[in-house]
Amino acid sequence: MKILLLMSSVPDTTSKINFTEGDTKFDENGIQWVINPHDEFALTKAMQLKEKHGGELVVLNVGTSKTEPVIRKVLAIGADRAVRIDVEPTDSYFTAVQIADYINKHPGFDLIMAGKESIDYNGGMVHGMVAEMTNNKFINAVIGFEVKEGDKVEVSREIEGGKEVIETTLPLVIGGQKGLVKEEELRIPNMRGIMMARKKPLEVLPAVEAPVRTKIEKFEKPPVKGSIKMIDKDNLDELIDLLHNEAKVI
Amino acid sequence: MASYARAYADKTNQDVIAVGFLLENPEILYEYGVNKVLNVTNEKLKDFNAFAYSQVIKEAADKENSDLILISSSNDSIYAGPIIAQYLDAGYVSNVISLPEESDHFVVKRKVFTSKGIAYTAVLTDKKLLRISKNSFGITEKKVDGQTEEFNPPVDLSVYEEYKVVKVEKVTGKVPLTDADIIVSAGRGLKGPENWGMIEELAEVLGAATACSKPVADLGWRPHQEHVGQTGKQVAPNLYIAVGISGAIQHLAGVNGSKYMVVINNDPEAPFFKAADYGIVGDAFEVVPKLIEKLKAYKANH
């Protein structure tokens, strides 16, 4: 099975989010970059599929050279080789065009995996657009994936209040999330993996011309919450009063 | 959604058209300002399929010459969003929290960095697709004279064969977490799964859904579907009550879209107190049962 993992390098969840250059840019000062958590579930599933069915796992990232440490981490965990398309991914459509161009020029991937969204811009759309642009089938919010016989697969998708199981065939694009593999199955690189990752190929390709469809003009921080009101544990009537009259939620 | 559309339509002097699938009471939408309902009555489209539904939405947008298409942030809409965007060649913005700004071009605010930032995002295409963030825009009643049309454009139904749904599992009789107006959530502070009775009772009194923190799901005390947080579900209820949850940043990332948050914790240093609106320092086993009694009395009078 030939698998392509679409991976985003994102600020660690605990990062302080600040903006710079007149609030037009994300402030990268002191940011710790990590594999997008939803992509991590997809990566682990990809590794399991490769181990079970054989094949190749390629990781693809659209980003400038600053994403390379995170790409190396994916290689250390077990991807066979990496491709980086050298451009800042500022718009989802633009990013999807870059990925689709690569896939269309390198056909033969049975499964294209991504996280359901990245935790930085939370767009949740690049992988779906890629599916359309490459004429591949697409299932989102995937919480289970099993290969049946031949190219038949059984895919579980999260729906409101439950899940549905879908039978379909490869090739396929999926947006993965927690549940695709168990949390404890997530992998971290070991020393041997890190050593090997240094020798694995990381191909850097130029971006193709494409328009952007959306543009971020400026950022701001969400309004600061008013300070917390503390309520005495022996005066719960006050809480009920606040919830009813102030918050108006009960 | 209808209220968002109505508010924008009023500003720009346009009509609001809604697309529905086998709606039984399309008239209800007139109450919220919908001028026209396109009701798909083809039984074959009863169940959601992202590709079939996206085709219908494209056909509706073409027929009505719509330049602004709105979808919700349900799982199904999130799935269909990029497909619709491609069918319409539309610029697509997700997690939108505001009406377009007063500006010479089209700009909306959207949540980014898991609600830790807001990005003013311009849409540069003629057709625009917006996915409205949950609970970000109030519902306003505004009755208009509406009409409903049966709408059955040609749809390639082979997608139902290509993606064959073989099983659906739904938790019945419970409020789905992502739809809930009120969520009662509990963490490791409850000490064990046997102590969840009072959480479920509190939820029942409030008509709320129950949720939990990541450690609780990882320990198997509660099902994984209840886990809210960065890698669990992202929720945005009107009221989120956190019992015995310290408020790690990964947890807050999943709940900070909530309108109001109440935290009950015996540790006054718990980080959740910095994020919440109302706080009670106290033992959950003492506070929660008392709160249930008080709420029962309150509910009896309201």
Image: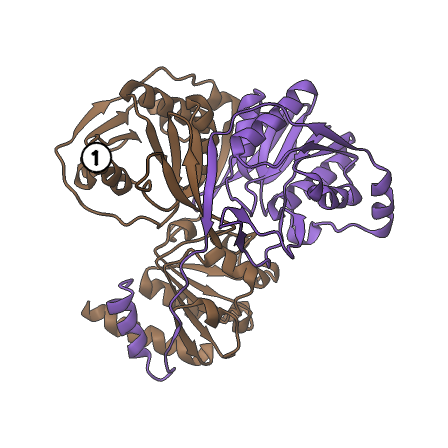
What residue is shown with label 1? B34
Give percent across and percent down for residue A83.
73, 32
Can the viewer see residue A118 in this picture?
A: yes
Q: What subunit carries mark 1?
A: B
- Residue sitting at 47 percent across and 40 percent down? A216
Give percent across and percent down for residue A106.
70, 21
User: What color was chain B assigned in the picture?
Assistant: brown
Give percent across and percent down for residue A211.
52, 25
Closest to the observer: A244 or B211? A244
Q: Residues within 10 Å of mark 1 (few under 14, many from 20)?
A: many
How is this picture coloured? Answer: by chain
Question: Identity of the amino acid at label 1?
Answer: Val
Can the viewer see residue B25 in this picture?
A: no
- Residue sitting at 73 percent across and 28 percent down? A1
Q: Up-down: is B57 above or below A43?
A: above
Single out the residue that lies furthest toward the bottom.
A234
- Residue sitting at 63 percent across and 23 percent down? A208
- Residue sitting at 41 percent across and 23 percent down? B88
Looking at the rendered structure, the secondary structure element under dot 1 is: loop
Closest to the observer: B274 or B81? B274
User: What color was chain A assigned in the picture?
Assistant: purple
Q: Up-down: is A177 above or below B275?
A: above
Position of the N terminus of chain B by quadrant = top left
Question: In the image, is B127 to the left or to the right of B164?
Answer: left
Closest to the observer: B212 or A10? A10
Single out the residue that lies furthest toward the front.
A22
Give percent across and percent down for residue B2.
26, 39
Question: In the image, is B276 to the left or to the right of A144?
Answer: left
Single out the residue that lies furthest toward the left.
B145
Position of the C terminus of chain B by quadrant = bottom left
